[in-house]
Amino acid sequence: MQAEQISIFLENKAGRLSDVTGILWQNQVNIRALAVADTTDFGVLRLIVDDNAKAEQVLKNAGFTVRKTKVVAVEVADQPGGLHSILEMLYKAGINVEYMYAFVRQSGDNAVMIFRFDQPEQAIDVLSQNGVTIVEGARLYTM
C-alpha cells in the first residue's frame, strides 16, 4: 500500500532545482507532487512523479544523488478538521509523522497528503481500520 518517492540531494545554490526540473521535462517525466527541505549547504527535493524508474535513471545519469523512499498517500477530507482527524488517529496509536506534503489534485472531494511515518505498516493499519483511504502507488502516479 506504500507509494514510491524519489529524493534528490542538491547543493543549496541558484539553478539546481531548475537543473532537475529541466532534466525531467526533457525526458517527459511529469511531477505530481514535491517538497523541498533545506539546510545551509544542501537540500532534499522529494518528488512524486509519473515514471519513477525513468526519473531515477535520467537524474543519476546527470550526476545527481537519487534515492527511492517509501511513503504513504492518504485521502484527507477537504474540509476544516480533515487533516486534524487523521493526525489524531496517528497520535493516539503512537505513530510519528516524520514529514508530509500535499499532492496537487485537479478534481475530487478529498485532498491527498503524502506522509512518511516512523511505523508505516502500523499507520496504514490504523488509518484503514478508521475508514481512511490509502492511495496505492499505481493510482497515485496517474492522478
Image (tube, helix red, strand yellow):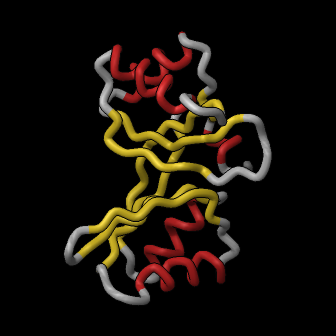
Percent across and percent down for residue 139 are: 70, 41
Outermost residue on the left side: it is 40
Quadrant in which residue 78 is drawn: top right
What residue sits 32% from the left and 24% below the top? 95
What residue sits 29% from the left and 19% below the top? 94
Percent across and percent down for residue 110 are: 69, 35
Outermost residue on the front side: it is 80
Percent across and percent down for residue 50 are: 66, 58
Residue 12 position (above or below residue 35): below
Along the line of sight, the residue nearer the viewer: 45 or 79: 79
Outermost residue on the right side: it is 107
Residue 135 position (above or below residue 53): above
Residue 13 in the figure: left or right of residue 121:
left
Residue 105 position (above or below residue 60): above
Outermost residue on the bottom side: it is 14
Percent across and percent down for residue 53 are: 56, 60
For the N terminus, give its image quadrant.
Answer: top right
Residue 66 in the figure: left or right of residue 105:
left
What residue sits 50% from the left and 36% below the top? 72
What residue sits 38% from the left and 59% below the top? 67
Along the line of sight, the residue nearer the viewer: 89 or 34: 89
Residue 118 in the figure: left or right of residue 71:
left
